[in-house]
Image: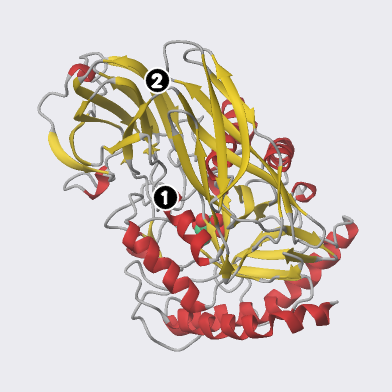
Amino acid sequence: MTRIFDEHVIRRVRSLDGAWHFRKDPLNCGKETAWFLGIPRGETVAVPSVWNTEQGNLNYEGVAWYEKHFYSEGGCLRLCFGAVMTEAEVWLDGNYLGSHYGGFSQFDFIVSDVAAGEHRLTVRVDNRFDADSIPQEWVDWYHYGGITRGVSVETLQGICVLCNRLEYTLSEDLKSATGQFVLELYNAGAEQADTEVNISLGGTLVSTGVAELSAGARKEVTLSEFTLENVALWNVGAPELYDVRITTATDDLCDRVGFRKIEVKDGAVLLNGKPVEFRGVNRHEEHPDWGFAFPFGLMKKDIDLALEMGCNAIRGSHYPNSQEFVDLLDERGLMFWSEIPIWGCGFSDEALANETVVRRGLEMHREMVKYYYNHPCIVLWGMHNEIHSYHEAAYRMSKLYYEYLKENGGNRLVVYASCHPLKDICFEFSDLICLNQYFGWYYGYEDDAWEKFLAEFCEHIKTLGMAHKPIVMSEFGCAAIAGCHDDENILWCEENQAKQIAHCLKVFHEHPQVAGSFIWQFFDMRTCLQAGLNRARGFNNKGLMNEYRKPKLAYRAAKELYHEFAAEETDRFDFKG
Ligand code: ADA
């Protein structure tokens, strides 16, 4: 998979990114007419990409086919996909390999006994919606389709390491860590085999073991426990990382990990034992010129902008972001909230109770945990956003996901964003109470709307016995068209947005129970007109910057305040006691 460092020194990996053959299939006849044996009369497109940015395809929603020819020395091949929007079916040389559902997670297929020579990889992509879709059709982002993240082919030999996670606990004084690596191994050989497995951390051998697997078997193996003294902790602004190298007799996997502790104590969020206030933004990994096939250079720029603004956290609204982005966050020391695309407004009560939807959501959580487990920057797992959290089906779904993530998700807080503060019945399944509210934009225009709301809400959670849970303002904001200037009370102008955001940030910062803010949103983004959302320009314009990263006045206002908050962080929490 695409990372910002080499994952393999031994294993042979070849990127299949670049020119692919492409053809839309609006009549959905490609399977019947066997396009997996060769797409007739296609055109050349780039992968990764979304088809919507190609001429004439802006609004295309349906099926499309992609084909790539490549040479291989043969043997056992692993075909890796970073993400396909939304459902993929895959063939190699006309042989069906399988399918994958979910537009924002990686997946792979292993094929053994592949002959040396030229091969044809075919992918049928379907981005249509139905009753079982996640997200449901109505979303506040664009309905893109395509192979949106990188594709690669790996040659597997002998016993290989497909995946790893480091489970660890830190000592009370945070000075040492006890951990163990859990590996997913695969035997690509034709016979039963065994191998020695060695793991080094920061260049020091910390764990060894022997694994035995029958031909073609996949197996989870836990290696011996180790203790690391004098741990250099991963922290906001001081992100210490350790290189990991796992080797078998024939294969290897490189990764990076960091050690840190996130917890809730006495009404505050503690990172490595110290109170932390989230100074965050919501960010869609989307750009009108690239859709969800977001360029690496722009990821880096977005992080530069977040740091310049004084942020210490980003919410990956509303789906798992690409590995490269999360790698950069690890490296630059920003906390991350990673969630799956269960997006509220479009989720009816029927969808919440639909067994396929609930199962697909759980699978998305499993994939997110599996592939992102080792990222120290991920401090929050997000289960869903703005669902009908007053409904019994939402309660059941939240319980299921919460229990899964608490049990399997490592040292993270598990949360969801609620827009039904006074009716919500699921708060017990969230370590923080995260609220999305839009006073000053959709409702509540009086000057003290936020103060009144927070006072009422805090009384309410007392009656629920949840006053000990920190509140996080996970979304708030208002729209402004970049370059539109007027009186600060006029909707859509930059002055109004800047005034509203600054007001919110001050109110939240001063409030003893609020543990931070995630402004909606970092950048303007293209949204879905066909789904009935009437958004000016066809964009959600609540960005602190426009889609081309041109700052609005609100960016400057937020920047000033976030820098002030950062400077007084320690005192503020001491004062809160
Ligand atoms: C919601 C939702 C966001 C966005 C926002 C808005 O809170 O979670 O994705 O749609 O509203 O701009 O209205």
Q: Is the residue marked 1 within 8 Å of ligand 1, measured from its CB?
A: no
For label 1, the residue is 532
Image quarter of residue 508: bottom right
Q: Secondary structure at mark 1?
A: loop
Q: Nearer the viewer, residue 265 or 255?
A: 255
Is 48 situated left or right of 441 in this image? left
Residue visible at 38% across and 41% down? 9
Is 413 situated left or right of 30 in this image? right
Q: Amino acid at mark 1?
A: Gly
- Looking at the picture, how far across and down is residue 472, in whole percent? 69, 64
Viewer-nearest of discs 2 and 1: 2
Is 170 situated left or right of 88 in this image? right
Marks 2/1: CA distance? 34 Å
Quarter of the rendering occupied by the N terminus: top left
Q: Along the polypeptide, which appears first: circle 2 or circle 1?
A: 2
- Looking at the picture, how far across and down is residue 210, in whole percent? 60, 26
Residue visible at 71% across and 35% down? 400
